[in-house]
Amino acid sequence: MPSPRAGLFVTCLVDLMRPSVGFAAARLIEAAGCTVVVPDRQTCCGQPAYNSGDRATTKTLALQTIRAFTDCDYVVVPSGSCAAMLKVHFPHLFASEPDLETEARAFAAKVHELCTFLTNICPIGKVPGRYSGRVTYHDSCSGLRELGIKSAPRRLLSTVDGLQLTEMPEAEACCGFGGLFAEKYANISNAILTRKTDNAATVDADLILAGDLGCLMNMAGKLTRNGHPLACRHVAEILAGELTDPPIGHATVATP
Amino acid sequence: MKLDTAHFPANAAAALANPRLQSALAKLPGGLVAQRRAAVAAVPEFEALREEARAIRDATLSDLANHLEAFEAKATAMGSHVHWAVDAAEARLKISDVCRSANARLVIKGKSMVTEEIGLNAHLEGNGIDVVESDLGEYIIQKRGEAPSHIIAPAIHLTEADVEADFRSYHTHLNPDRTLGTPESLVAEARAVLRQKFLTADVGITGANFLISETGSSIIVTNEGNGDLTQILPRVHIVVATIDKVVPTLDQAITLLRVLARSATGQDMTAYTTIATGPRRADDLDGPSECHIVLIDNGRTEMLSSGMREALRCIRCGACMNHCPVYNAIGGHAYGWVYPGPIGAVLTPALLGITETSHLPNASTFCGSCETVCPVKIPLVSLMRSWRDRAHDQGPRTRTARLWSGTWAYAATRPALYHLLARFGIAIASAFGRRKGHFRTLPFPRGWLKHRDLPAPQGRTFQQLWKETERGVPR
Ligand code: SF4
C-alpha cells in the first residue's frame, strides 16, 4: 500500500520567520509513515483578514487553501490556531453556499494539527528528537479551546530522551498575542504577556515550548527584551531534533 | 450612563498605570475564578446543566412574545401593574411616574444593571427624589460617584483600604476613632446606616434575575439580604427588567439559578433567593401594598433578529469577565459603559451602535476563555468577530491600516507573487536582524516593539528552501 500523502500547511509565520519548524514538521510526518508534499499555492490561513472583519479576503484565501490540497489524504498544520481556522472556521465561512460548504467540510475532515496527527491519526510512536534539559509547555488558546489539544504534545514530549517537562502555573492562560491585537492594543497585550512570562519564569526550565509560532514570538520577544535566559522553541523542533538554529529571537553566534 | 467607549485605549492605559486598581484586580484569579472552579468541579453534571440552561434560554427567546404576554397576564392577575417601555427614556418616565404618584421622597434600590443602563438614578434625582443604593458594592460606588466596574461585584476595583477611607469621610456622624479595618466591620457599618433608609424609603426598586411566566413572579438573588428588605419594607415595589429576563416555569428558573450561582461566585446557591409575586395579600405578614413591573425593550427586540440573539441568553453571572485576560488587565471602567468584559463587548455595540464602540469587540485576543465558562454557552468570540465584520464594512479605519491590509490581501491571494515578495522581504529583514536574532527598534510595528523585541527571520522562506531541497540543494 502506498504511504498516505500528507500536505504540509506551512503557515505564514513558519514560512517567513522560522522555516526550521516546517522542516521539523516534515521530518516528523515522514517518520509517521507519510509522504510529505508542500503545495506552493498556499500562503496564509486568512486569520488576519478573518479577525479584522474582512470576509471577502478570508473566503478567497480559504478557497485558495482548500484547492491547493485537493490531492492530499491529510493536511497537517504545525499551529493550533491555523489548524482551527482550517478545520473549524472554513466550513462556517460558506454557510450560505452549499456546494462550497460541502467542499470546505470535506477539506476540514482531512486537517489535523501536527501533535494531534502524530498521536491520533498516524501515531509516530517514539519521536526522533533527543533533548537533555528542562522544558515547560504553553497551551496556545485556539489549539486548546477549539481543538482540545492538551495531552498530545505532552505525550509526544514524554518520548523524547533526556527531556524533563515541568508545568508552569496558568499554562492555559493566554499569552496576549491575539494577532493584530498585540500591535493595536500593545499595552494591554503587554500586561497579559508579562503575567505569562512571569509564570513561566517561576518554574525551573530552560525552554518554553508551544505549538504556535505567534505565541512563541510574542513570549520570546519579551524574554529577550528583558535579557531573561529562558528561551522559546516550537515543540516540533524538539520532537524532531531540529536544533541547529538558535532558539526564537536568539543570535546564531553569541554576540560579544 | 455616559458613553466613553471611544476613549478605550486611553482609559485602558490609565487603568494599567493605576497601582490601586491593579492590586484590586490581582485578587480575581484567586477569588471568583478559583471559587467557580471549585464549585463546578463539585458538580459532575455541570456540563449537562450548561447545555440544559442554554436550551431553556434558546427556547424562550424563540417564542419571547408569547412568554411575555403570559407573564403579563399572570402578573396582572396576581395584582401587579405591568408597564412596557420601548427605550430608556420611556422606562425612566414610567418609573418616575410611579414614584410621583406614590409621593416618593426617598427611593431605596437593590442592585440592578438595567437601571444603570437606563441612567435611572440621575433621572430620579433630577426629579427631586433621593436614591440610596442598598447593595454594599453599589452603596460604595454611589457615594464615590462611580459606575460599577463589574456586573456582580460593582466595587471590585476598590480595595478594603479605599472603602475604609470612604466610610470615614461619609459617615461623619460616627465616632472617628472607631475600628474599621475588616470587611466585617465595614459591612456592619453600612448595614447600620442603611437600616434607617429601608425604614423611611417610600419606594423600593429592584431588578430581576428572572421573571416567571407561569407564576407572574420576579426572582432576585443576593448575598446580603438587602434585596429582600428593598422589596418588602417600602410601601411601593417597582421591578425593573429587560424583556429577555422571562423564563416560562419556576423549574426552569431553578436550573438557571444552579448554573448562575456557581458561575458567578462559586456558591451552590446565593445566600438569598427571593421570589416576589404581586403586592401583599390580606394574610401576608409583610410586603408592599403596590407592585409595579416595568418591562424594557431598549434594543432587545432588534437583537433577536440581528444575528445577536445568542447574546440575549446571558444571565449576567460575570464569569466571562472574571476569566477574560483583557478584563483582568484593565478592569471594568475602561470599557466605558455599563457592561464590561466579553459580554459588554457584544452587548454595548448592539445597544448603542458599532460606530462609537468598535474598540470593544476589537480589544480581544479571542482566547476563548469566556466561552468555555459561560453557563449558557454564548459564542462570545463569534459574536465579537461579527461586530468586527460590521465595523469593517462601515469603516472608518485609518488610511495606513487600509493600505497595509489591502497590500497584504492583494499579495496573499496571489501565491506566486506572494512567495516572490516574501523571499526578498525576508532576505532583507534577516540581513539586518540575524546578528542579534531580533529587532529592538524599527519604524514598525511600533506597539509591539514598545514592549518586546521582534524575533528576526531565519533568512530564507520555507517555500524557497523546500523547493531547493527537492532539487537536492543542501539546506
Ligand atoms: S455572557 Fe455568559 S459568562 Fe458572561 S455574564 Fe452572560 S451568562 Fe455570564
Image: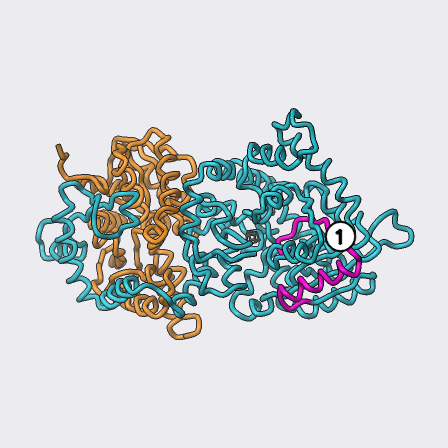
Chain colours: A orange, B cyan
Question: Does residue A235 show up?
Answer: no
Residue depicted at x 91% and y 54%: B282
Name the side, left or right, on which B325 lies relative to A61: right
Q: Position of residue B108 (x, y in %)?
A: 72, 49
Q: Is residue B93 magenta?
A: yes
Q: Quadrant of residue A135?
A: top left
Residue name at image x 27 percent, y 57 percent: A9
Res A133 quadrant in image: top left
* Residue in view at x 21 percent, y 54 percent: A16
Q: Residue type at mark 1?
A: Arg
Q: Is residue A63 above or below residue B39?
A: below
Q: State the quadrant of the N terminus of chain B.
A: bottom right
Give the labeled residue for mark 1: B105
Say left or right for B12 vs A239.
right
Span colored in magenta:
B85-114
Which residue lies most toward the left here?
Answer: B473
Chain hosting mark 1:
B
Left-right relation of B37 to A13: right
Q: Nearer the viewer, residue B346 or B380?
A: B346
Inspect the magenta stretch and tell me whether residue B77 lies in it.
no
Residue B373 locus on image (x, y percent): 53, 49
Badge 1 marks a residue whose secondary structure is: loop
Q: Is residue B475 visible?
A: yes
Task: Give the quarter of the image for residue B193.
Answer: top right
